[in-house]
Amino acid sequence: MLHRFVSLFFCLTGILVLVVAKVTKDEHKAFDRLVKAVIQEGGYVHPSIGILSPAPSGASRGIGMVKNVKPKIKSGRDMLMMVPYSYQMTRDLALSTLMEVIPPMVLVDAPLLELDDSALLVLLLAHEYGLGKNSKFLAYIEFLPTWQESGGGCGYENVQDFRQLPTGVEPEEIDMAQQYASRVSLGMTGDYGEYLAQDAWPKEWKDEPALALRWALCVVSSRATAANRRAGDNDSGTGVRLIPLVDLANHRKASGGFIELSGNERIMYDDFMDATSDDTGSFVVRSTWKCGTSRVDLEKGDEITVNYNLPGYQAVDWFVSLGFVPAELSSSTMKANGEL
């Protein structure tokens, strides 16, 4: 089972979560565009899936079944979503993209290869944002919280009363996270900021490019997911990716986790679907619970949740990286405006 993951690039095992405003009609349309983009890349999205606001899990927003439709698919009857490797933000994509826009002499002094996956994804996301309509990830970026929606900061920075922090989270830890995030965004801006695409950046970012890196850092630290270093290869070590659409699923301990396909799955060998080599590296969310051992039939109004599988995380780790403390750790969960 794969883990929801925040790279060691971010101290405190994580830092930030974006505050998200209430879902609007425009956001529903943005969600539809994101689904279309995933399908156009060869992915799959169950036709009943849409936005739930508020979400049954307690978050202000989630994804789930908004209508009852029986899909016609060849295999994987309990598959809800499959996002192909070609529509994921990865280390390899970041390196190939950034090396085309950053001058070689700059890379001599600040080698991209020395950065970890999360740092590379921060740069890639800020760059893709700047490309605007020329970005293949436009539909994904449009559905992400904007800098304005976040109130000019990240979730933990919008806590008004430290007395309401969950047990196990201290104000000093939030201050440390804020200071570290500032140093990281300023440092990356100094090394690479001027070479990133900026045409589609809001005026505030153009005036202060570190804000673009800060926003991207917020997104990566709260949404990045552990994955195989090489697509579909369980023996290649652990990497980090941004996986559009599936990163909208909220956490529930009883649910199954994310699945990365090797491309060799076969129903005849007791796998849940027949995969092909084209599916290698794809991320799947299934309609399962009890760590993926039991199927569950979802109906209209049911939320799609996954187990983030973070057994070593304490309350502070959850809060500073994901913006909430799960029910299994706290009976009084305090959210930084909810969902991921």
Image: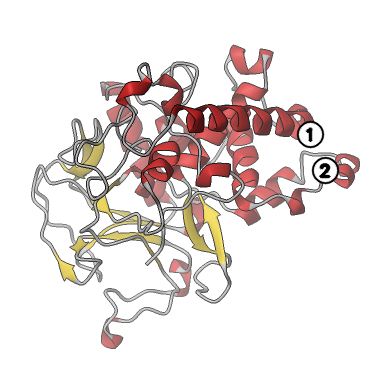
Residue 6 is situated, as x and y percent measured from the top left of the image, at 50, 49
Mark 1 crowdedness (10 Å alpha carbons): few <14, some 14-19, many ≥20: some
Residue 177 is situated, as x and y percent measured from the top left of the image, at 54, 33
| The label number, if any, that marks residue 226 in the structure image | none
Q: Is residue 270 above or below residue 163?
A: below
The reply to whether residue 195 is in sight is yes
What residue is at 35 percent from the left and 54 percent from the top?
Answer: 308
The reply to whether residue 199 is in sight is no
In which quadrant of the rendered image does the N terminus lie? bottom left
Question: Given the image, on which type of amino acid does mark 2 rest?
Answer: Ala
Looking at this view, name the residue that lies furthest to the bottom: 269
Residue 42: image quadrant is bottom left
In which quadrant of the rendered image does the C terminus lie? top left
Q: In the figure, is residue 291 to the left or right of 214?
A: left
First along the sequence among labels 2 and 1: 2
Q: Nearer the viewer, residue 79 or 177?
A: 177
What residue is at 58 percent from the left and 65 percent from the top?
Answer: 229
Q: CB under 8 Å between callouts 2 and 1?
A: yes
What residue is at 41 percent from the left and 20 percent from the top?
Answer: 158
* Circle 1: element type: helix
- CA gap between label 2 and label 1 equals 7 Å
Residue 171: image quadrant is top left
